[in-house]
Amino acid sequence: MDRVDAVVIGAGVVGLAVARALAKRGLETIVLERADAIGTETSSRNSEVIHAGLYYPTGSLKARLCVQGREQLYALCESHGVEHRRCGKLLVASGDAQRRKLAQIEAQAHANGVADLQRLSAAQARALEPALVADEALWSPSTGIVDSHGLMLALQGDLEAAGGAVALRSPVQAVRCGGPLHEVDVGGESPTTLATPLVVNAAGLWAPSVAACMHGLDAHHVPRAHYAKGSYYALAGRSPFTRLVYPVPEDGGLGVHLTLDLAGQARFGPDVEWIAPASPQAIDYRVDPARAEAFYAAIRGYWPELPDGALQPSYSGVRPKLRGAGEPTSDFVLQGPREHGVPGLVNLFGIESPGLTASLAIADAVVSQLWPG
C-alpha cells in the first residue's frame, strides 16, 4: 500500500485548485480522476464567466467565496498568462416586477461587498449596447470571462511544479475512514490502495456518490444529489453585443443569458431541465433542438431583433444541486471534521456556479477546514 500526504478526488477546477493549495504547503498530493482528462464535466460545460458576486445571500459561502475568489482568479490569470477579459455585464429588467427585483439584487450586491455596480436608465444601457431593450439595468464592470481549460492547465502546472500529480482513469471505489490513515481504493487499469491522512472529495456532480462509499462517514452526512441540465445555443453570425447580458434570475439558475467567448462569439443559456442520471455515463449531453423555441422567447425579452433561425444547438452542462425543482437554492457545503467528526476529511457538495470564480477561495477554505486557526 502506497502512502501519500493528501488525496483529492476529482480533477475539475475546484479539485485542481484544492490540490494546488495542498501541494504548495509541501504535501505530496495526488488527484484521482475517473475520466481520461481533467475538467470534463461541470468545469468545462459552463458559461466561463467570472462572476462579481451579485446574487448570493449575504454571509453565505457563495457570496463570500465568490467576491474573494474573483480577485484571486483575475490575479492568477494575469500572473500565469491565462486568457481572460473584464468585459463587464449588464443585468437587465423590464416591467415593474423585474425592476423591483433588480433593486433587490443591487442591495444584495452592495451587502456582499460589490462596490462598483452602476444603475443605468434605459437610454444609458442602450448607449452601451444599442441592440438592447430594457427599462433599467445594472452595470457590473468586474464581471468577466475566462478560458476555463487554460485556467485548469495553469492550476495543474502549479500542482505539478510543487510535486503533486494527477492520476487519470483512476476511479475511487471506496474510502475507509476512521484510523490515523484513510485507505482509498482506486480502480482502473492498475488498481491500487492509497493510505493518506487527508482526503478531499471534490468530485462535483458525483461528490455525494463518492461520500456514500466512505466507510466510517455516517450516512446522514451524505446529501441527496439533484441534477439540473442546462443547454446552450450559439448565435449564427456576428453578435451585436460586446458585453454580457443577463435577465433577472429564475428558479434553478440565472436565466437565459447572453455570454461571449474570448473570440467574441455569442452564446445563450443555460436553461433548466431537471434530470436524474444513475451514473456519469447515463448523462445525455446532446442539446434538443426543440428547446430553442423557449430560448427565442426569453432572449427577445431583451433583444427583440433576434432573427428567426439564428440559434444553433451548441453544448450542455449539468449543475450539481442539493435542492430540487421548486425548492430554495442551497449554499455551497464545505463539510469538514467539525461537521462530521472524521479527522482529515473534507467533502465539497453542491459546488455549482459560482464555483469556477470561487475556486481559489474554496481551496483556501478547505485548508482552513483541515488546519483551523
Image (cartoon, rainbow, N blue to C red):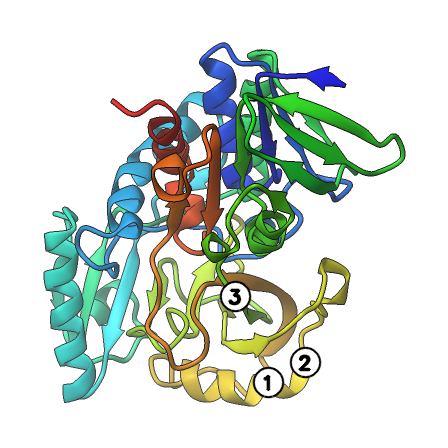
Residue 26 position within the rendered picture, expressed as x and y whole percent measured from the top left? 49, 10
User: Nearer the N terminus, badge 3 or badge 1?
Assistant: 3
**290 horizontally vs 136: left or right:** right
Secondary-structure class at tag 3: strand
Check disc 1 and report the residue beneath it.
Answer: 291
**Residue 124 seen in the current view:** no
Three-letter amino acid code at the position of disc 1: Arg
**On screen, 5 above or below 228?**
above
Residue 208 position within the rendered picture, expressed as x and y whole percent measured from the top left? 56, 54
Check disc 3 and report the residue beneath it.
Answer: 267
User: Nearer the N terminus, badge 2 or badge 3?
Assistant: 3
Q: Quadrant of the C terminus?
A: top left
- Label tally: 3
Q: Are marks 1 and 2 in contact (CB under 8 Å)?
A: yes
Say the numbered circle drawn on residue 245.
Answer: none
Examine the image and state in which quarter residue 244 appears: bottom left
Residue 254 position within the rendered picture, expressed as x and y whole percent measured from the top left? 37, 69
Q: Identify the residue at image location x=58%, y=79%.
A: 310
